[in-house]
Image (spheres, rainbow, N blue to C red):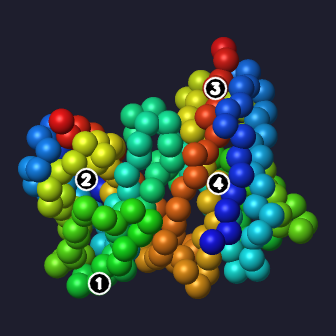
């Protein structure tokens, strides 16, 4: 059981480039979400999904797109990378988005935009 | 959204108990209190959650004030592996998909 798997672990982009951060979970979780964590700060919610075909915005969605075509995968797309998007990105999932279900996190993708 | 306030940092000695406080004076009746921790270079991991009653599990205990405006995460015997950032989060029954983390408390454990 791999849990939540994020790829790549590290990425360097130039300003204006696009890329997709991958997130996959093998726990058949309905709920998935993306967070970013800047140095010395807590996590901020970017987007989340309560099931295949359903996504919604979190606290800081600008500059990011998501889609959820399968239960297992929830990719995060950066359309035109900016230095302000330099951060560590965490994907999380839970059985369902309820008060009872703990979030399971991946180990993060460290992104640098130059 | 109801917010939480935690100290920026705390220190503890190894094998001693640690009490990590969290204030949530604007908590609503439908908010659950969740705690997560983040070890260095890892994603956060779930620790414990509760509503009104004190809770215990293999990792920690959660003590909730009678008026629910504050709570305390208790690590009974701190180890060096407990050094992490601890987050206290409120999760609303009716808006529980939008889960937001604050800056948390950085716990240092001294040998």
In the picture, measured across the screen, residue B79 lies left or right of residue A26, that is: right
Return the mark for residue B88.
Answer: 4
Q: Do the residues labelled 4 and 2 touch (CB within 8 Å)?
A: no
> Toward which corner of the image does residue A112 lie, by quadrant?
top left
Instruction: Give how far apart the Cα atoms at labels 3 and 4 are.
Output: 17 Å
x then y, percent, for residue A32 = 35, 69
Which residue is disc 2 drawn over? A5
Point out the residue furthest to the right here.
Answer: B66
The quarter of the image holding the C terminus of chain A is top left
Which residue is disc 3 drawn over? B108
Return the mark for residue A54.
Answer: 1
x then y, percent, for residue B67 = 89, 68
SS at mark 4? strand
Q: Are marks 3 and 4 in contact (CB under 8 Å)?
A: no
The residue positioned 71% from the left and 52% from the top of the image is B5
Q: Mark 2 lies on which chain?
A: A
Instruction: Give how far apart the Cα atoms at labels 4 and 2 are.
Output: 25 Å
Q: Is A70 situated above or below A109?
A: below
The residue positioned 78% from the left and 40% from the top of the image is B19
Q: Pick whichever of labels 1 and 2 is earlier in the sequence.
A: 2
Foreground mark, 1 or 2? 1
x then y, percent, for residue B85 = 57, 39
The quarter of the image holding the N terminus of chain A is bottom left
Q: How crowded is mark 3: few (under 14 residues within 10 Å), some or many (20 or more)?
A: many
SS at mark 3? strand
Looking at the rendered structure, whether the residues under marks 3 and 1 are on a common chain is answered as no
């Amino acid at each position: 059981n791999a849990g939540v798997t994020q790829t790549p672990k590290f990425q360097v982009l130039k300003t204006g480039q696009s890329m997709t951060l991958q997130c996959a979970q093998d726990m058949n979780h309905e709920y998935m979400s993306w967070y970013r964590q800047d140095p010395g700060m807590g996590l901020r919610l970017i987007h989340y999904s309560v099931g295949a075909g359903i996504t919604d915005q979190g606290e800081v969605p600008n500059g990011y797109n998501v889609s959820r075509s399968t239960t297992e995968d929830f990719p995060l797309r950066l359309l035109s990378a900016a230095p302000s998007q330099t951060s560590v990105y965490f994907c999380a999932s839970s059985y369902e988005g309820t008060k009872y279900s703990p979030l399971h996190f991946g180990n993060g993708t460290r992104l640098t935009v130059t | 959204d109801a917010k939480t306030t935690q100290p920026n940092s705390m220190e503890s000695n190894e094998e001693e108990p640690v009490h990590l406080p969290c204030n949530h004076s604007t908590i609503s009746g439908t908010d659950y209190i969740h705690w997560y921790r983040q070890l260095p270079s890892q994603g956060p991991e779930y620790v414990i959650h509760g509503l009104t009653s004190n809770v215990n599990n293999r990792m920690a205990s959660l003590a909730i004030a009678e008026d629910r405006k504050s709570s305390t995460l208790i690590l009974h015997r701190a180890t060096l592996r407990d050094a992490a950032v601890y987050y206290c989060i409120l999760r609303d029954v009716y808006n529980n998909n939008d889960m937001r983390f604050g800056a948390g408390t950085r716990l240092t454990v001294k040998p």
